[in-house]
Amino acid sequence: MKLFLTTLIFLITFFSVSFDYIEDGHFTLSLKSRKLPSKKKFTLYENKGSWTNNYGNYGTFFCYGSIQSVTKSFEGLLVICEHLDSDDEKFWVLYERSNDGDEGGSGKATYIEGLGKWKNFKGTKCIFATKYKGSSGFSKKKCKLTENLHKELQK
């Protein structure tokens, strides 16, 4: 029984170890919209800003995308951002969320490409939330990392 409990505790500990990646962003937002008579709207989205993460890295980013509520097939935000870190290495993230309104919302972020330490992040999925106050925006992204990605960021 003692061996069973020891093995069980080891397995639970081994498989429950995960590493969180947390990124905070601050940005300036530019929106250009067209409204239809039906109150539906299409908005071009552009922002640029800075970010920090819980691994001590930091950098800048810029994003382009759209916020749509024109058709029933897709109503939401679709944005791609290019990040540049403090080591001059780049990565690109696709952000998607349903149309929660003009004050922000939450959704999923997917790393689509990366250079240097970010190369192995391709396909990593995260959650994000964003809020706007006028033309200023604030965001937080959280990802579960594998041990290999965690070690890569510690270098």
Image: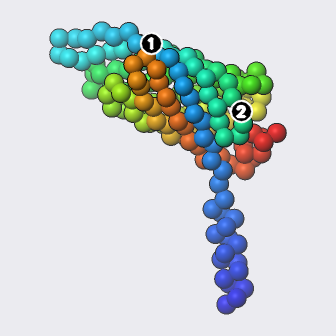
x, y (%) of residue 52?
Answer: 64, 32
Point out the image quarter for the C terminus.
Answer: top right
Q: How many marks?
A: 2
Crowd tier of the residue under label 2, counting other residues whose Cα lies within 10 Å: few below 14, some 14–19, many 20 or above: some
The image's mark for residue 138 is none
| SS at circle 2 | loop
> Label 2 is placed on what type of residue?
Asn
Q: Is residue 109 above or below residue 45?
A: below
Q: Residue furthest right?
A: 155
Q: Residue at x 69, y 29 (%)?
A: 58
Q: Is residue 27 visible?
A: yes
Residue corresponding to mark 2? 57
x, y (%) of residue 16?
Answer: 63, 62
Task: State left or right for residue 48 relative to residue 154.
Answer: left
Displayed quadrant of residue 115: top right
Q: Residue at x 27, y 26 (%)?
A: 72
Crowd tier of the residue under label 1, counting other residues whose Cα lies within 10 Å: few below 14, some 14–19, many 20 or above: some
Q: Nearer the viewer, residue 79 or 103?
A: 103
Q: Residue at x 63, y 42 (%)?
A: 21
x, y (%) of residue 127?
Answer: 50, 40
Task: State left or right for residue 64 relative to residue 51.
Answer: left
How far apart, in angstroms, are the residues tagged by discs 1 and 2? 26 Å
Displayed quadrant of residue 91: top right
Displayed quadrant of residue 135: top left
The image's mark for residue 30 is 1
x, y (%) of residue 90?
Answer: 70, 23
> Label 1 is placed on what type of residue?
Ser
Task: State left or right for residue 130 relative to residue 123.
Answer: left
| SS at circle 1 | strand
Work out whether mark 1 precedes mark 2 in sequence or the reverse, and give the earlier one: 1
